[in-house]
Amino acid sequence: MTFATEIDIPRELLRRFECAESVLVLTGAGISAESGVPTFRGGGNTAVWKGMPFDVISSASMVQRNLAAVWEWFDFRRGVLQSLEPNEGHRAIAQWERLVPELTLVTQNVDGLHQKAGSQSVIELHGNIWRARCTSCETRYAITPDEDRSDLCVSCGYPLRPDVVLFGELLPAGAFELAGERASSCDLCFVVGTSSLVYPAASIPEIAKAAGAYLCEINPEPTPLSHICDTVIRGKAGEVLPLISNQNKLSTATANQVNIR
Ligand code: OAD
């Protein structure tokens, strides 16, 4: 396994990136940290809400017991998010859609910052905080920063809830299956800014690795996945990801000049 510092991107990784036919990127809360979004397990004001740990307030049973409290927490989180912008990490991945023959972006994040950075195709494993969903007929509604959200479904009158996967709930139909399918056929898999503790999302890089993909983790901290990675880059996503595409362009230009490709 190669360990790299923030500015030391292994040549082997650059080579793999340049040759890859299919790249999968799995992101977690850490990619949005440099935009100012608090991570779940890094402390901060979303780890505990009014005395409740996030996995209690953000749970299926809390929707049953106290939907208003769940909304209050998600309204607070949207309030934090609405003024925040994507960072260089989100932007680099959006740019990769044009650099790589097939790019699959899978995110556990619900903040919508990948889309805001320009990513066209995002598999959202845990939903999106900018949508509401009917608790009965499942009609979905966009929530915008400028308008008050509704409490009730226009179609059937039942209460709406955040269109986000909560603890104790299943992932949206088809999302994990599609991510797993892409993972099993990618050449190169990046795992960016996730503690790799929450399943089934954490199994996606394991599927990629088992199918023969080169696995690269980008995270300032070790995770339970680190030991199976081919390369671990201990750095911040917003600093490391742009270097991979920029150094790649640079190395391609240099190689072209001296005619060694
Ligand atoms: P966590 O809060 O568990 O982990 C965030 C990870 O990001 C940690 O490993 C940090 O070391 C890393 N990190 C912090 N800053 C970073 C940076 N600038 N660049 C790169 N990495 C950085 O968040 P997730 O792994 O996303 O699920 O959590 C997974 C799921 O648990 C979430 O989707 C959410 C939560 O419960 C649901 O809500 C269903």
Image (spheres, rainbow, N blue to C red):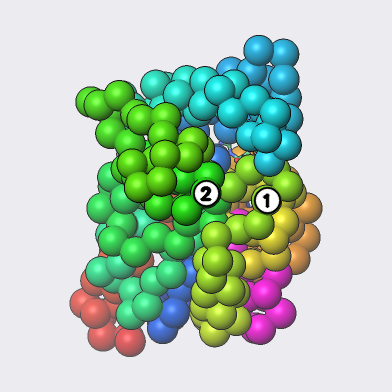
Residue 3 horizontal/vertical position (percent): 65, 56
Q: Residues within 10 Å of mark 2 (few under 14, many from 20)?
A: few
Ligand 1 within 8 A of label 1's CB? yes
Marks 2/1: CA distance?
15 Å
Q: Which residues are magenta?
A: 206-217
* Residue 43 in view: no
Mark 2 against mark 1, which lies toward the viewer? 2
Residue 161 place in picture, x, y as percent: 50, 38
Residue at figure coordinates x 67%, y 75% from the top left: 207
The structure residue drawn at horizontal position 65% and vertical position 83%, both measured from the top left corner, is: 212
Looking at the picture, which amino acid does disc 2 mark? Ser
Residue occupying image coordinates x 64% and y 67%: 204
Q: Residue most toward the front? A: 156
The image shows residue 66 at horizontal and vertical percentages of 65, 25
* Residue 151 on image: x %, y %: 42, 30
Q: Can you see residue 75?
A: yes
Residue 216 falls inside the magenta stretch: yes
Between 141 and 119, the residue placed more toward the observer is 141
- Which quarter of the rendered image does ligand 1 occupy? top right
In this rendering, position of residue 49 left or right of residue 13: right
Mark 2, residue position = 136
Instruction: Please tell me the numbered disc located at residue 5.
Output: none
Residue type, numbered disc 1: Glu
Work out whether residue 73 or residue 237 is closer to the camera in this orientation and state it.
73
- Please give the name of the residue rendered at 60% of the width and 81% of the height, measured from the top-left corner: 184
Q: Which one is nearer the viewer's eye here, 258 or 231?
A: 231
Q: Which mark is residue 169?
A: 1
Residue 109 within the segment the image draws in magenta: no
Q: Is mark 2 within 8 Å of ligand 1?
A: no
